Image (tube, helix red, strand yellow):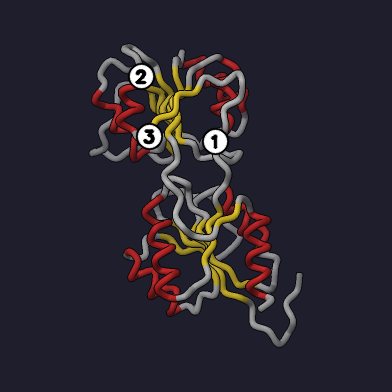
Amino acid sequence: MTQPEDTAPLKVLVLGGTGDARALAARLVTDTRFSASVSLAGAVERPDAYPLPVRSGGFGGVEGLSGWLRDNAVGALVDATHPFATGISRNAAEAARATATPVVRLERPAWRAGPADRWQEVDDLDEAVAALPPGARPFLAIGRKEIARFASRSDLDCLMRMIDPPGEEERLPRGRLVLARPARDADAEVALLSEHGATHVVAKNSGGPWGEAKLIAARRLGLPVILLRRPQALEVHSVPDVDGVLDWLESLSAR
């Protein structure tokens, strides 16, 4: 879609780091009604590429993000971060409120268990650690920052996957480390779990297609899944997908 010549494009900041954010960026880059950029937290050394201008690193809390929104005359803020990235989502909501910047949260639907799934839902990582039986061989698909919580269980033999190698100071549980991005191929996940002799999968209920392959693999192998429930949603306007974000942005640009 093209923008009328006498109308400036709406400046959009996308808080990214997810497959949703990349899909949204691919749509925004060709739409002349918007001038969009993406912000990444900088937690991954080799992030996936985006077709839009990217800034990396934190803003410095609510005050820093508020200043950035003002200084760059941002007309719309899109929070497309991970469902468990509660800190940045909270900061985004407060900064948007402080600067009167319209904000929307892309909140993809949570996964729901099917008849063949063996899920045990827990509220936090402490419950997840305690839920594993003695001598379990879990696949820990929870992100590198949380893996250290399982190091207290010396009886476990863990399979861990990270995008970047751990730092020397990071404490890991006993087991095998694989440096790779999450697979979207369920067959590949079945092969990985089978090779390790996995007895459980531990994951966060992130929703969306990007991490679902491990759950499909667990279903095929009949493995129990310990699934962390999502944090309580913030009181901001939310939509379930990229189309919902684009509809919301279109309504703003039409004003």
Q: Amino acid at mark 2?
A: Leu
Q: Residue at x 45, y 74 (%)?
A: 69
In the rendered view of the protein, which quadrant contains the N terminus?
bottom right
List x then y, in percent, for residue 166.
Answer: 33, 38
Q: Amino acid at mark 1?
A: Gly
Q: Report helix, strand or loop for mark 1.
A: loop
- For this orientation, the residue located farthest to the bottom is 6
Earlier-in-chain disc, 1 versus 3: 3
Disc 1 target residue: 211
Residue 123: image tag: 3
Earlier-in-chain disc, 2 versus 3: 3
From the viewer's perspective, tell me whether residue 242 is left or right of residue 79.
Answer: right
Q: Residue at x 31, y 12 (%)?
A: 134
Disc 2 target residue: 132
Q: Of discs 2 and 3, which sits in the foreground?
A: 3
Question: Closer to the camera, 242 or 195?
Answer: 242
From the viewer's perspective, tell me whether residue 165 is left or right of residue 73.
Answer: left
Q: Of discs 1 and 3, which sits in the foreground?
A: 3
